[in-house]
């Protein structure tokens, strides 16, 4: 059975192409109106349900019904904006910008470009190969590969929506610092011999930025395509993550969580990193859980360390990188980044 496209969609698309600025303004106004109505709507739904307002179930449902649409709305808006930004920073353009750069400043550039360059775990190997072929130093390549999944638009959007700009800015600064320093250290260790032989033997190519003369309408199309691609990929993680967070928020006693993830448990940061490294999750699924853990008394440094280890050292990415890296280089990568995350966690538990 085939389904016909709704008749209004071609007309809407034609209107967007003729009036791109009007579309952006109208879309922003609608987005803001919906966002500011979420809190009273979620409270009204919970009040309408036949449950005790002070019960564990009531708290869990209110968490879920408010955070689910809020996260999807925030994510859609920021992913759309980042899709427009990404239209200036394709992987090929990023590779051309980094090719031939010396370490140091290049690590800073690579980590910064990792924020705005499209990335997923499945693209880690082709990006890595492309960087090596273009003559990008190994340490600079790792700065990019650490920053791209760790400090991405999904993580920053969810942090901004759930914790405010201060925590989002803190996470941005910490993620970039880890990516820059870890990449620089790996570069200083001169571990090119631990690339797989077939990667080392590849001929170098001249990296080119390519033509990027897109209209505003083309960039809007890129933003909409980015929303469809990313929301389509992570929506299930978001719902599962919020559901787990809602259960923690409604049912887990605060004293219990503080006893195992609070500041007084000196081993909590180390345990959080060791548990986080082999986990299979992404920012969309882990941040709602982090929010619930913080609300129940977990220390900020501990949950940041847990979140960073899950995102920056995800098991699928390590498995894919094994195709191009020998085990010793992968182990070094995990050790350097893991140590940086540990330091961040302990410092913040000591200071905050």
Image (spheres, rainbow, N blue to C red):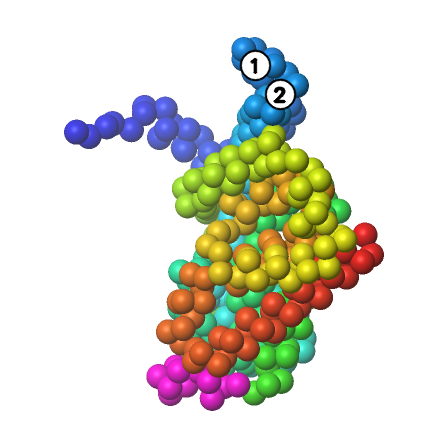
Q: Main secondary structure of the magenta part?
A: helix
Q: How far from the left and from the top, in percent, is residue 94?
A: 52, 67
Q: Position of residue 217 (x, y in %)?
A: 48, 43
Q: How many marks?
A: 2
Quadrant into which the N terminus falls: top left
Is the residue 55 above or below the residue 267 in the image? above
Residue at numbered disc 1: 51
* Label 1 residue SS: loop
Q: Secondary structure at mark 2?
A: loop
What residue appears at the point 41 percent right and 85 percent down from the top-left corner?
200
Q: Which residue range is magenta in the image?
A: 191-201
**Does the residue at mark 2 contact the one at mark 1 (Cβ under 8 Å)?**
yes
Q: In x, y percent, where is residue 36?
A: 65, 25
The residue under label 2 is 55
Instruction: Answer whether residue 281 is magenta in the image.
Output: no
Determine the residue positioned at 55% across, 33% down.
247
Q: Nearer the viewer, residue 218 or 194?
A: 194
Residue 12, picture quadrant = top left
Q: Marks 2 and 1, Cα distance to the nearest angstrom?
A: 8 Å
Q: Nearer the viewer, residue 259 or 261?
A: 259
């Amino acid at each position: 059975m085939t389904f016909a496209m709704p008749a209004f969609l071609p007309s809407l698309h034609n209107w967007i192409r003729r009036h791109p600025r009007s579309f952006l303004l109208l879309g922003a106004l609608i987005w803001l109106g919906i966002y500011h109505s979420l809190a009273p709507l979620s409270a009204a739904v919970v009040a309408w349900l036949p449950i005790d307002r002070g019960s564990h179930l009531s708290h869990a449902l209110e968490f879920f019904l408010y955070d689910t649409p809020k996260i999807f709305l925030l994510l859609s808006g920021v992913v759309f904006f980042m899709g427009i930004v990404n239209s200036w920073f394709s992987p090929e353009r990023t590779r051309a910008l980094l090719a031939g750069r010396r370490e140091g400043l290049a690590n800073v550039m690579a980590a910064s470009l990792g924020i705005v360059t499209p990335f997923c775990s499945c693209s880690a190997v082709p990006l890595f190969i492309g960087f090596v072929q273009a003559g990008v130093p190994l340490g600079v390549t790792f700065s990019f590969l650490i920053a791209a999944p760790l400090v991405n638009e999904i993580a920053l959007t969810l942090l901004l929506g759930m914790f405010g700009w201060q925590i989002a800015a803190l996470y941005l600064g910490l993620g970039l610092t880890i990516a820059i320093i870890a990449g620089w250290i790996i570069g200083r260790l001169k571990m090119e011999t631990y690339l797989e032989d077939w990667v080392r033997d590849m001929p170098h190519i001249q990296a080119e930025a390519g033509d990027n003369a897109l209209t505003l309408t083309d960039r809007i199309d890129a933003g909409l395509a980015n929303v469809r691609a990313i929301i389509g990929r992570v929506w299930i993680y978001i719902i599962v993550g919020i559901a787990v967070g809602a259960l923690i928020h409604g049912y887990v006693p605060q004293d219990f969580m503080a006893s195992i993830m609070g500041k007084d448990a000196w081993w909590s940061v180390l345990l959080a990193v060791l548990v986080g490294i082999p986990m299979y999750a992404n920012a969309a699924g882990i941040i709602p859980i982090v929010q619930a853990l913080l609300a129940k008394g977990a220390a900020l440094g501990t949950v940041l360390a847990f979140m960073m280890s899950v995102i920056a050292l995800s098991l699928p990415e390590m498995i894919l990188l094994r195709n191009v890296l020998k085990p010793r280089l992968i182990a070094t990568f995990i050790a350097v980044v893991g140590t940086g995350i540990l330091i961040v966690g302990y410092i913040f538990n000591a200071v905050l």
